[in-house]
Amino acid sequence: MNMEPSSISVPSSQQITDARLTLLSQKLNDVVILYSIKNLTALFKPYFTEYLIRSISQNNLEHSTKYEAPITSLEYTSRTKATLSQSIIIGNGLAAEDQYIEDRIAQLVYTGGVWKVDRVDYAIRVLPAGFGVYNPA
C-alpha cells in the first residue's frame, strides 16, 4: 500500500489497516456480482454506509471491472474521512501504444469504530505512449 503524504493526523488506533483496505476493495468487487440480491443491506452493512447501499439499490451499480491488490493510494482527508484510489488497465489503443486506465475512487468514512465505503466513482483516462519512458541526456 502506498500512503500519500498527508498533513492530517489520524491516531494509529484509527488508521485503516491493509487487511481492512483489502476487504473493502473485495466487497466493492462483490457488489458488482451481487447487486441484484434484494437484501444488500444485510450483506454489505458492515462495509458500506447506508448512503452507498441505497445508491447501489437505486442505480443497480453495473460495473464489471474487478480491482485487485495492491491499493494504488490512500489519502486521509480528515480524521474520519479518506480517499482510496485504485487503477486497472482495461485496454490498449489500436497500435498498442496508448493504454486505457480505469480508476475507482472510493470515499471512506470512519463511523461506529470502523472504516466504511460511503461513495464510489469511476473514471477512464488514457496513458499516452511513451509516458513512462525515461531517456537520460
Image (cartoon, helix red, strand yellow):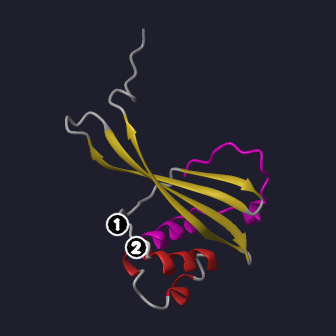
- In this rendering, the answer to whether 135 lies above or below 123 is above
- Around disc 1, counting alpha carbons within 10 Å, would you say few (fewer than 14), some (14 to 19), or many (20 or more)? few
Q: Are marks 2 and 1 in contact (CB under 8 Å)?
A: yes
Residue furthest toward the top?
Answer: 137
Q: Which of the pair 84/40 is nearer the observer? A: 40
Q: Quadrant of the C terminus?
A: top left
- Give the SS element for disc 1: loop
- Around disc 2, counting alpha carbons within 10 Å, would you say few (fewer than 14), some (14 to 19), or many (20 or more)? some
- In this rendering, the answer to whether 66 lies above or below 97 is below
The structure residue drawn at horizontal position 62% and vertical position 56%, both measured from the top left corner, is: 83
- Give the SS element for disc 2: helix
The structure residue drawn at horizontal position 52% and vertical position 59%, both measured from the top left corner, is: 121
The structure residue drawn at horizontal position 44% and vertical position 72%, both measured from the top left corner, is: 61
Q: Quadrant of residue 118?
A: bottom right
The structure residue drawn at horizontal position 71% and vertical position 69%, both measured from the top left corner, is: 110
Q: Tell me where residue 109 appears, x and y as whole percent.
A: 68, 67
Q: Tell me where residue 128 appears, x and y as whole percent.
A: 36, 32
Q: Which of the pair 2/35 is nearer the observer? A: 35
Name the residue carrying label 1.
Answer: 64
- In this rendering, the answer to whether 75 lies above or below 39 is above
Q: Is residue 49 visible?
A: no
Q: Residue 32 — which label?
A: 2
- In this rendering, the answer to whether 57 lies above or below 24 is below
Q: CA distance from mark 2 to mark 1?
A: 6 Å
Q: Residue 81 — which label?
A: none
Q: Is residue 9 visible?
A: yes
| Identity, as a three-letter code, of the amino acid under mark 2 | Val
Highlighted range, magenta: 1-30
| Identity, as a three-letter code, of the amino acid under mark 1 | Ser
* Residue 17 magenta: yes
Q: Tell me where residue 107 appears, x and y as whole percent.
A: 61, 61
Q: Tell me where residue 25 appears, x and y as whole percent.
A: 49, 66
